[in-house]
Image: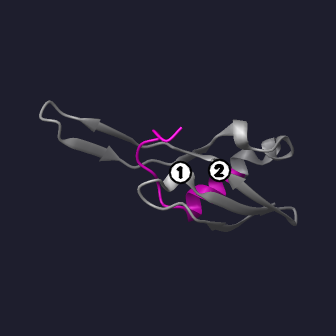
Amino acid sequence: MVKFISYNGRWPFLCRGTLVIEVNGKRYELKLILVSGGNISFDSGLNPSITFGKWELNMDHLPTELHKYAKEITDVVNNNVEFGCCGGCL
């Protein structure tokens, strides 16, 4: 069971925060774990178009013992953290 505790990422680097979760009673502090599903593009006049999207996990930063909980962690994150926009931080 995955429980959301907190996330401290803030605009404009929303993906650079620390995610704190509890899995089966054990607490984890995960850094650089989120990757945005959104994006930023520009039209010919260099006007930005921003799309906010659901989070994905950076599996390289997820401890091996949590890989089997990846979907549940992702769902908990997407239910508790505002969506990000570009995914360009990584």
- The residues bearing labels 1 and 2 have C-alpha atoms spaced at a distance of 13 Å
The residue most toward the left is 45
Mark 1 sits on what residue? 15
In the image, taking residue 14 as reference, residue 47 lies left or right, namely left
Q: Position of residue 73 (x, y in %)?
A: 70, 53
In the image, taking residue 2 as reference, residue 12 lies left or right, namely left
Examine the image and state in which quarter residue 60 appears.
Answer: top right
| Residue at point 64%, 54% (across, down) | 75
Amino acid under label 1? Cys
| Residue at point 71%, 52% (across, down) | 72
The residue most toward the bottom is 5
Q: Position of residue 38 (x, y in %)?
A: 42, 43
Under circle 2, the secondary element is helix
Looking at the rendering, the stretch of residues picked out in magenta corresponds to: 73-90
The disc label shown at residue 90, or none: none
Q: Compared to 17, does 68 lie above or below?
A: above
Mark 2 sits on what residue? 74
| Residue 87 or residue 23, whichever sits in front | 87
